[in-house]
Amino acid sequence: AAGVIQSPRHLIKEKRETATLKCYPIPRHDTVYWYQQGPGQDPQFLISFYEKMQSDKGSIPDRFSAQQFSDYHSELNMSSLELGDSALYFCASSTRTGEVETQYFGPGTRLLVL
Amino acid sequence: AQTVTQSQPEMSVQEAETVTLSCTYDTSESNYYLFWYKQPPSRQMILVIRQEAYKQQNATENRFSVNFQKAAKSFSLKISDSQLGDTAMYFCAFMKMVGGGSQGNLIFGKGTKLSVKP
């Protein structure tokens, strides 16, 4: 079965640089979530999109922005990177077709800020 | 606001034995879902089992089952016949039903690191 695809899988950036993380949801999934997991931490919700519109917002810094495109893929844009942004970034997708919504996670993008 | 508490930071179990991981949560919502996710060393987040709050019957998935006590706001995970591949961090997660059939984001506990020993 198709899974959530995230790219790149690994990313190394310098402080103050920008980064773009991409997420391709499972086919026919219309909702995308972004989570950030710091070392030894639980995942923290950043932002979500449903049918290309932002549906909810969590602890996402103002330096970050995201969007969902017409093909349902999503991008997380991160600017003015800080050392504390080093983390594993997950994208999860789900569908709201009346069944119980279950979020399926991608493999994550490991971001290291030096 | 909802909170999820996992009171066991680490646990270990012998291969083939049974282990129970605890999870409690706090919410004023009446409609919600509960999940257990597994995160092995690869750090992939893998769904283990889910429970709808409106269902009284406890969910089961092969060797994994839950004990859902809605009044006590407790949601424990039992792993039977533990296997070496069960070694992982286990996260309990809460998701409220926002309305109109849509649901919200996941709220995770801090996790329980499970080690299965040969």
Image: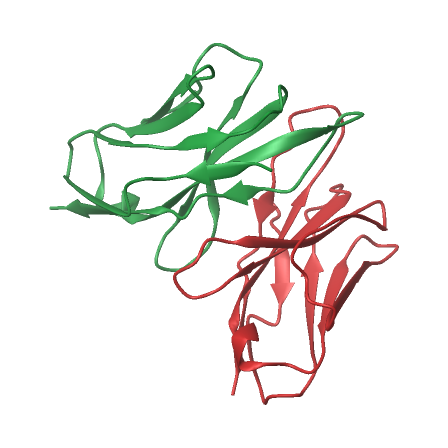
Question: Residue B21 location, x and y as percent?
Answer: 30, 34
Q: Choose top left, top right, bottom left or bottom right for residue B37.
A: top left
Q: Choose top left, top right, bottom left or bottom right for residue A23.
A: bottom right
State the green chain.
B
Which of the two residues, B10 or A61, is positioned nearer the viewer here? A61
Q: Say which residue appears at 55% left-offset and 70% top-offset.
A: A9
Residue lying furthest top: B56
Residue B67 sits above or below residue B92 on the image = above
Q: Is residue A13 left or right of residue A19?
A: left
Q: Say which residue appears at 28% left-offset and 42% top-offset.
A: B8
Residue A11 sits above or below residue B80 on the image = below
Q: Colour of chain A?
A: red
Question: Residue B67 location, x and y as percent?
Answer: 37, 19
Residue B14 sits above or below residue A58 on the image = above
Placement of the N terminus of chain A among the 4 image quadrants: top right
Q: Choose top left, top right, bottom left or bottom right for residue A82.
A: bottom right
Q: Is residue A17 left or right of residue A65?
A: left
Q: Say which residue appears at 63% left-offset and 31% top-offset.
A: B96
Q: Say which residue appears at 45% left-offset and 23% top-offset.
A: B73
- Colour scheme used in the picture? by chain
Which of the two residues, A41 or B63, is positioned nearer the viewer here? A41
Residue A50 sits above or below residue B19 on the image = below
